[in-house]
Amino acid sequence: MMEVGLEANTFGRSQLGVTAINCNIPQGPTLGDVDGDGHTDVVVPTLSGNIYVLSGKDGSIVRPYPYRTHGRVMNQVLLLDLSKRGEKNKGLTLVTTSFDGYLYLIDGPTSCADVVDIGETSYSMVLADNVDGGDDLDLIVSTMNGNVFCFSTPVPHHPLKAWRSTNQGRNNVANRYNREGLYITPSSRSFRDEEGKNFWVEFEIVDKYRMPSGSQAPYNVTTTLLVPGNYQGERQIKQNQIFDRPGKYRIKLPTVGVRTTGTVLVEMVDKNGLYFSDDFSLTFHMHYYKLLKWLLVLPMLGMFGVLVILRPQEAVPLPSFSRNTDL
């Protein structure tokens, strides 16, 4: 049995209310605006198969919940914005597995569900990310039978929609998309090889959550270049900055002087201590052989050009060895 109720800003302060859930709770809750009313809701799975949604305003149960599955729910519930391109749906979708062998996708405002029969049980949370390299969001389900399922969705991928681990890195169990977070822009995260002395990383701070606490600034951002063991210098090159408002920002990082790979990790902590992060990989000086190719080809092209320029301008007849000559 658990008694829950909180007015959640972003977990900073709380106002206690009471709601009794008379069942065992196997995993922690997840947070997000489930019904689209602008307030944080708390989603709680239970061993009885019921999924409760509690209002962040007073701790009461949001109707028409609880949603009942036909088996135990042993994992945290994933909260996603599954609106397609051009759609502006309010609320979120609850994604979870149950011990009845189904994967549930429950519409937040209406509690209407689509189910997928996977025929297996799972203790782990359903995760979301772009797995196949396309532009859509994929759902990853691992089961007790040792199988890993990947389900494609028609939803466009966004870094803030991805949910790669239970706590999203450290201490964040809330949906980030259209709420609060940090992500590296597509122009910076695209895979590339750096050859100069410096390179730029562009990221965006998002903070659209306003009820009831307003902005979560200041944002403490740390950018780290992680370099593997074949580099003789610092393995972690860090820069730290504090920003007082959301928006896009650029940070310049130095390249390393050896042929290697690297990872750029951008981390942010807001005023409440909530942790957000994003990362991408890149290489350094991997394509140096292209320069060697031109070093070999250009001198040859230069010599050929000189020969063409300095060739005789008037045609010279070839010598004849014929005995018949016109006198």
Image: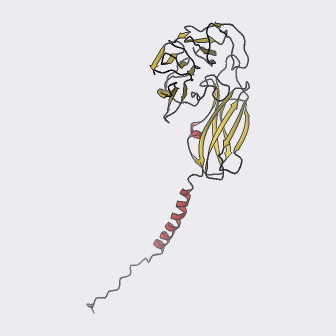
Q: How is the image coloured?
A: secondary structure
| Foreground residue among 121 and 6 | 121
What residue is drawn where x is 47% and y is 72%? 309
Compared to residue 322, the image places residue 25 above or below, namely above
Compared to residue 306, the image places residue 260 above or below, namely above
What residue is drawn where x is 31% and y is 88%? 321
For the N terminus, give its image quadrant.
Answer: top right
Compared to residue 143, the image places residue 192 above or below, namely below
Whole-percent x, y for residue 129 in the image: 54, 30
Q: Quadrant of residue 202?
A: top right
What residue is drawn where x is 49% and y is 66%? 301
Whole-percent x, y for residue 304 in the image: 47, 70
Q: Is 35 placed left or right of 205 in the picture?
A: left
Whole-percent x, y for residue 160 in the image: 59, 28
What residue is drawn where x is 70% and y is 34%? 221
So how many labels did they put on this image?
Answer: 0
For the C terminus, give its image quadrant.
Answer: bottom left
| Foreground residue among 307 and 235 | 235
Residue at the bottom extreme?
A: 327
Whole-percent x, y for residue 296 in the image: 53, 64
Q: Is 36 placed left or right of 2 in the picture?
A: left
| Foreground residue among 278 and 147 | 147
